[in-house]
Image: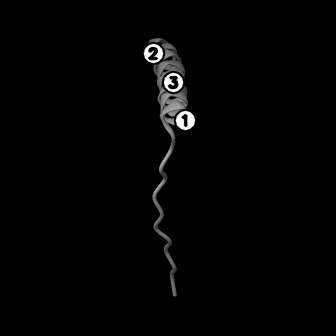
Amino acid sequence: MHKAFKFRLYPTKEQTILIHKSMGCSRFTFNHFLARWNES
């Protein structure tokens, strides 16, 4: 039997900004190294 839990986050305005910044940095880093991988 599998169990699943659903939940929803309600971040504050400051937390939302920090989440978006973190995701942007992660995306930039991933794309940078993906490009280097494709070059080699």
In the image, what residue occupies the spot 48% across and 34% down?
Answer: 13
Image height of 31 relative to 15, above or below: above
The residue tagged 1 is 15
Q: How is the image coloured?
A: one colour
Q: Amino acid at mark 2?
A: Ala
Image height of 20 relative to 4, above or below: above
The residue tagged 2 is 35
Q: Give the mark nearer the N terminus: 3 vs 2.
A: 3
Q: Residue furthest bottom?
A: 1
* Frontmost residue, 15 versus 19: 15
Structural crowding at the residue carrying mark 3, measured as other residues with C-alpha within 10 Å and reported as few (<14), some (14–19) or many (≥20): few
- Check contact, mark 1 vs mark 3: CB within 8 A: no
Q: Give the mark nearer the N terminus: 1 vs 2.
A: 1
Marks 1 and 3 sit apart, C-alpha to C-alpha, by 10 Å
* Frontmost residue, 39 versus 12: 12
The residue tagged 3 is 21
- Check contact, mark 3 vs mark 2: CB within 8 A: no
Kind of element beneath mark 3: helix
Instruction: For marks 3 and 2, give the one nearer the viewer.
Output: 3
Q: Give the mark nearer the N terminus: 1 vs 3.
A: 1
Q: Which percent across, then down, holds residue 31?
A: 46, 20
Q: Which percent across, then down, holds residue 12?
A: 51, 40
Marks 1 and 2 sit apart, C-alpha to C-alpha, by 30 Å
In the image, what residue occupies the spot 45% across and 58% down?
Answer: 8
Q: Which percent across, then down, holds residue 7?
A: 48, 63
Structural crowding at the residue carrying mark 1, measured as other residues with C-alpha within 10 Å and reported as few (<14), some (14–19) or many (≥20): few
Marks 3 and 2 sit apart, C-alpha to C-alpha, by 21 Å
